[in-house]
Amino acid sequence: MEKLPITAAGHAALIEELRRRQQEDRPRIIQMIAEARAHGDLSENAEYHSAKEQQSLNEGRIAELEDKIARADVIDLSKLSGKTIKFGATVTLVDEDTDEEKKYMIVGETEADVKSGRVSITSPIARALIGKTVGDTVEVNTPGGGKSYEILNVAFG
């Protein structure tokens, strides 16, 4: 079973979503099914079919969350340090073509959000950065073509 690296905050978010889906969404959906069932003929009951579909989606997400939580390898960012880029690093880069600065934190797949500067460890940019240090130049193949970045800073915590 492959472990999933994740920060403590990302792990807590998964646990909270699982709790909400099991303790709030599941009972609400069961109640919706019971109410729809009380309306009679199920073959043409749109409310019933909609509630059953919601139940299926919710139960699928619960199973997915349980799997991710079971495989989670929670990494304590406060214990990370060094000059080499690895999981948990916050990296400041400058685009060598536009001189635009960007800041990314390398996180687990489940907590990635590029708009907030959190990139997945499996993303092209993170894979290009891993193992590099300040002053290195990296080439990243992006959907919009190749980009060249210089690493300005590496921080942890």
Image (spheres, rainbow, N blue to C red):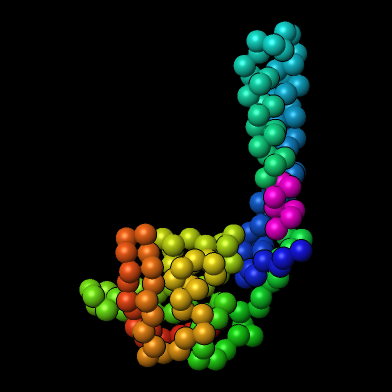
Q: Residue at x 35, y 73 (%)?
A: 102
Q: Residue at x 62, y 64 (%)?
A: 10
In this view, the residue in front, 55 or 99, is 99
Residue 4's spot in the image, x, y percent? Answer: 67, 66
Name above or below for residue 52 compared with residue 94.
above
Q: Quadrant of the C terminus?
A: bottom right
Q: Based on the picture, tell me whether residue 34 belongs to the magenta stretch.
A: no
In the rendered image, which quarter is residue 88 located in? bottom right
Q: Is residue 128 left or right of residue 42?
A: left
Kindly give the residue lying farthest to the left in the view shown: 98
Q: Is residue 36 above or below residue 17?
A: above
Give the residue drawn at x 67%, y 45%.
61
Main SS of the magenta part reads helix
Residue 107, position as x, y percentages in the image = 55, 70
Q: Position of residue 97 (x, y in %)?
A: 23, 75
For this view, does 122 lie left or right of residue 22?
left
Report the side of 80 relative to 139 (left or right). right
The residue under the point 76% across, 21% down is: 34
Q: Is residue 128 left or right of residue 99?
A: right
Q: Is residue 128 visible?
A: yes
Given residues 59 and 86, the one toward you in this image is 86
Which residues, given as a range, are shown in magenta? 62-68
Q: Residue 5, located in which quarter of the rendered image?
A: bottom right
Find residue 147 and report its horizontal and vertical position in percent.
Answer: 32, 71
Please count the marks in the image.
0
Q: Quadrant of the N terminus?
A: bottom right
**Front-lying residue, 30 or 119:** 119
